Image: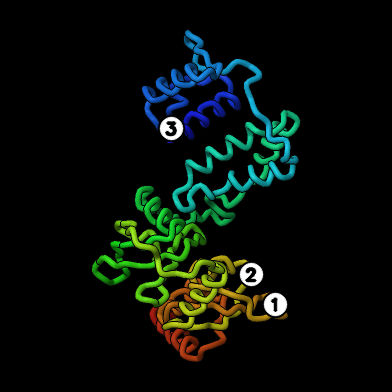
């Protein structure tokens, strides 16, 4: 860990020039005292770092101290910097590692690429925190220590003990064989088996985790994308309700937000410009609530039970607010 931090410290000084100990401490997420000890270690190892005293002082490197990665062209560097500038820092507890890797990429670029690639990356934004409707995504957090244990067990192929709080159940311990990690829409999941049966665990519901020494019972190779698709299909077909709905294109995003899943039911829109979509909801009550929010900008075509429920609700509302006379 310290070796990685020393490299990151050097790269920060290379890219930003003179920095104070407090600034370095914030960037590296350590104490100022640790930064001062690291500076002494770098100087002892021959790295040309020096201190400038005074109000605007700090630490800096002598010019010319660098290495170059000449194999990256401009577009390759831009791809890496753009990927690192999105919200990937939230995935699987690898935020500090991603930040460190991006500093190394920038520092290793040839001088001719460094400035242009960094400037171009600032003009590309991946997955901002709000969309055009000013909705902030609901980001689920997992403690770094818990995430590190789970990630280590998945990569090492060891069994896991999870203290898991399933919905509507008392939290309890269970031993699983981890297969892989998936993140989608800022939610992270552990794909595993338990006593040979497929299980999917939402990481935000893991209270604690322990890596066990025995190897996990799992195939040597796995198609994680295929496994995720299969589990999604099973989830959507179990206890859910499918609704064929016409919706005003301006309200499509609201439907996507409220439904469990939405897919296009027809290649073209209706003649009036509305979209036909197949939406999956948790149950009839959930579907009724979601479509009621859209008012006259949506129409449930099937199932009939949902149309009846919406009609009865509209009639009751009309009766409540009808003309008193």
Q: Nearer the viewer, mark 1 or mark 3?
A: 3
The answer to whether residue 153 is visible is yes
Q: What residue appears at the point 57 percent right and 65 percent down from the top-left corner?
A: 253
Q: Circle 3 — which element?
A: helix
Q: Quadrant of the N terminus?
A: top left
Asked whether the beta carbons under mark 1 and mark 2 sit within 8 Å of each other, the answer is: yes
Badge 1 or badge 3: first in the primary sequence? 3
Q: How many marks?
A: 3
Distance in Å between CA atoms under marks 2 and 3: 53 Å
Name the residue beneath numbered marker 2: 249
Q: In this view, does 118 lie above or below 305?
A: above
Question: In this image, 79 relative to 242: left or right?
Answer: right
Q: What residue appears at the point 28 percent right and 72 percent down from the top-left corner?
A: 168
Q: What residue appears at the point 41 percent right and 20 percent down from the top-left corner?
A: 36
Q: Position of residue 294 (x, y in %)?
A: 52, 72
Q: What residue appears at the point 52 percent right and 70 percent down from the top-left corner?
A: 228
Badge 2 or badge 3: first in the primary sequence? 3
Q: Quadrant of the C terminus?
A: bottom left
Name the residue beneath numbered marker 1: 269
Q: In this view, does 124 lie above or below 289?
A: above
Quadrant in the picture for residue 271:
bottom right
Q: Circle 1 — which element?
A: loop
Q: Where is residue 118 in the image (x, y as percent from the top left)?
A: 67, 36
Question: In this image, 107 relative to 307: left or right?
Answer: right
The answer to whether residue 324 is visible is no
Label 1 neighbourhood size at 10 Å, few (<14), some (14-19), many (20+)? some
Q: Position of residue 108 (x, y in %)?
A: 65, 33
Q: In this view, does 88 lie above or below 165?
A: above
Q: Position of residue 22 (x, y in %)?
A: 43, 23
Name the residue beneath numbered marker 3: 2
């Amino acid at each position: 860990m310290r070796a990685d931090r020393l490299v990151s410290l050097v790269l920060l000084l290379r890219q930003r020039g003179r920095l104070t100990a407090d600034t370095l401490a914030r960037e590296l997420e350590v104490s100022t005292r640790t930064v001062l000890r690291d500076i002494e270690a770098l100087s002892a190892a021959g790295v040309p770092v020096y201190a400038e005293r005074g109000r605007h002082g700090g630490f800096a490197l002598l010019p010319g101290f660098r290495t170059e990665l000449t194999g990256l062209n401009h577009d390759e560097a831009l791809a890496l910097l753009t990927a690192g500038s999105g919200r990937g820092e939230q995935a699987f507890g690898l935020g500090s590692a991603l930040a460190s890797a991006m500093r190394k990429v920038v520092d290793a670029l040839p001088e001719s690429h460094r400035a242009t690639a960094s400037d171009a990356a600032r003009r590309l934004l991946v997955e901002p925190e709000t969309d055009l409707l000013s909705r902030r995504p609901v980001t689920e957090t997992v403690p770094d220590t818990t995430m590190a244990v789970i990630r280590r067990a998945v990569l090492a192929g060891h069994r896991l003990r999870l203290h898991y709080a399933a919905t509507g159940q008392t939290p309890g311990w269970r031993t699983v064989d981890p297969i892989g990690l998936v993140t989608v829409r800022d939610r992270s999941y552990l794909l595993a088996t338990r006593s040979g049966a497929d299980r999917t665990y939402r990481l935000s519901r893991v209270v604690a985790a322990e890596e066990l020494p025995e190897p996990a019972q799992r195939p040597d190779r796995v198609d994680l994308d295929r496994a995720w698709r299969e589990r999604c299909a099973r989830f959507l077909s179990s206890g859910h309700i499918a609704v064929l709905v016409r919706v005003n294109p301006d309200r499509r995003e609201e439907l996507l937000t409220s439904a469990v899943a939405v897919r296009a039911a027809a290649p073209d829109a209706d003649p009036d410009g509305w979209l036909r979509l197949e939406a999956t909801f948790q149950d009839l009550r959930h579907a009724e609530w979601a479509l009621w929010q859209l008012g006259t900008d949506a129409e449930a075509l099937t199932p009939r039970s949902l149309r009846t429920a919406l009609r009865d609700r509209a009639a009751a509302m009309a009766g409540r607010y009808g003309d008193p006379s």
